[in-house]
Amino acid sequence: MGTIKTDQAREALQHRITEAIDPNNLRLTVSEASAYIPMPKGQLAQLRYTGKGPRFMKPTARTVLYRKGDIDEWLNASVRTSTVEAA
């Protein structure tokens, strides 16, 4: 049943991206970012804590937002041609 919910979340996010005037500036919630990457929310939280994840915004103490463009930039920076480079 979790897969259906995840698929619906990804479909809704894809619709938001398609309809956005500037998709790179589209702000995603942690749940949306998790669906977009895909990566568990807890892992995103750990990456925020260590400073190794995508840039994020924190407009209030309990609100975290990601810009789609920042996520894409972070993902593109992780491209490798061998496993030796990852170390």
Image (spheres, grey):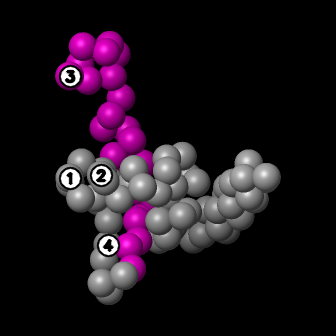
Q: Is residue 19 visible?
A: yes
Check disc 2 and give the amino acid type: Leu
* Residue at the spot of label 4: 57
Residue 55, percent from left and from top = 29, 59
- Label 2, secondary structure: give it: helix
Residue 78, percent from left and from top = 33, 34
Residue 23, percent from left and from top = 53, 63
Q: Is residue 62 above or below residue 14?
A: below
Q: Is residue 84 magenta?
A: yes
Residue 45, percent from left and from top = 35, 59
Q: Residue at x 79, y 52 (%)?
A: 1
| Mark 4 to mark 1 CA distance (whole Å) | 15 Å
| Mark 2 to mark 1 CA distance (whole Å) | 5 Å
Which comes before the other along the chain, label 1 or label 3? 1
In front: 87, or 54? 87
* Residue at the spot of label 1: 50
Q: Which mark is residue 47?
A: 2
- Label 4, secondary structure: give it: strand
Check disc 1 and give the amino acid type: Thr
| Mark 3 to mark 4 CA distance (whole Å) | 28 Å
Q: Is residue 46 above or below residue 79?
A: below
- Label 1, secondary structure: give it: helix
* Residue at the spot of label 3: 87
What range is drawn magenta here?
63-87
Which comes before the other along the chain, label 3 or label 4? 4
